[in-house]
Image: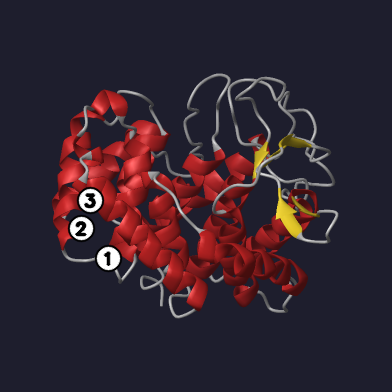
Amino acid sequence: MEKSVLEQILKVVETVYGTYVKGNWIPKAYADNKSRYLWTDAYGVCNFLTLYRETNDVKYLEQADALVNNVHDILGRERNGKKRLGTATDEYPTRGGLRIGKIDDEGSHDGDGQYFHYLTKWAFALSRMAKVKNDQRYVRWAIDLIKAVHPHFVYRDRNNQLHMYWKMNIGLTHPAVQSEGNLDPYDGYITYRLVDEMAEERELEKEIADMKSMVDVKYSRYRSSDPLDLGEALWITHWYPNEQWAKTITNKSLQALEELWQQGDFRESLNHRLAFREFGTTIGVQVNDQANEAWKNRVNEIHNLWLPHLYKRDKDISPVMFCTSLRPGVVSRHYLQ
């Protein structure tokens, strides 16, 4: 890693998560009523793991571990912090799922709950912990998480066709949003496979089959005009790039991103854009081998554009994803092979 890139990442990491203290470091809270946020912290864990692999400094591994434990201790509990979710315990902290970490309670429009695509992002981060540390405990937690949430998000309609809810309430007793996320079946499919491949015994065959059946039905109709969605699609497909669904979605995503670039979406006023959504794009085009050379220069252009404004809208999700985009590291299938 170039020294300048390392310095940029370290500066952001310290700003977002606080100065490292050996032996008893606890990640800094984002805000009093949003102390942890699942999506951001999944990227945070991956960033710490990449820093460890790049520098061989064990403190970054300690920080990754501390962040995992802090997320499980906060987002694995009810909002008042008193009780763990579902059947979770201190030893098995993911057996009730994990809250998003939203500021508002679950009854409000953009309130707390459980997002499927945040849960898969966390399961992925746990799988990277397992791979870097060669420790099955993280695989156990990822499998427990998947087993806990899958039956609540996935359902069959009157014609016996499988579908998904995009968001559930905190207790996983009813859907908070009835619709299905554009990428949720693909997200689940690759995450479940990545986790299951690392387990000592296969435990997710049924869940993988459920996801595959939805992927097979949906992939030919995939479309999006959102830079985060398209970047995530490129990240998802790069794990199993030779499968037909992945080839189709890769081609559609790259074509859609090129259209967005050519029509000037990435040159609009920053007031009409969101940094973290564009970092979704820059991560995706970097890890996916099918992205053309032109995107390398565009990635640098987007980075340089947002650098002075990283903390303008938020103090966590944009800067943390910026770090991942600067050095994708463990979020790339090529990195830990």
Total count of labels: 3
Callouts 2 and 1 close, C-beta under 8 Å:
yes
Up/down of 182 relative to 234, above or below: above
Label 1: how many Cα within 10 Å (few below 14, some 14–19, many 20+): some
**Whole-Å distance between the Cαs marked 3 and 1?**
25 Å
Nearer to me, 157 or 86:
157
Which residue carries the number 2 mark? 295
**Displayed quadrant of residue 156:** bottom right
Which residue carries the number 3 mark? 6
Residue 53: horizontal and vertical position, in percent?
35, 64
Q: Amino acid at mark 2?
A: Trp
Q: Amino acid at mark 1?
A: Ala
Residue 155: horizontal and vertical position, in percent?
79, 54
Nearer to me, 19 or 209:
209
Nearer to me, 52 or 86:
86
Up/down of 222 relative to 117, above or below: below
Residue at horizontal 25%, vertical 39%? 265
**Whole-Å distance between the Cαs marked 2 and 1?**
7 Å
Q: Which mark is residue 291?
A: 1
Residue 143 vs residue 297: left or right? right
Q: Which of the marked residues, 2 or 3, is nearer the chain's N terminus?
A: 3
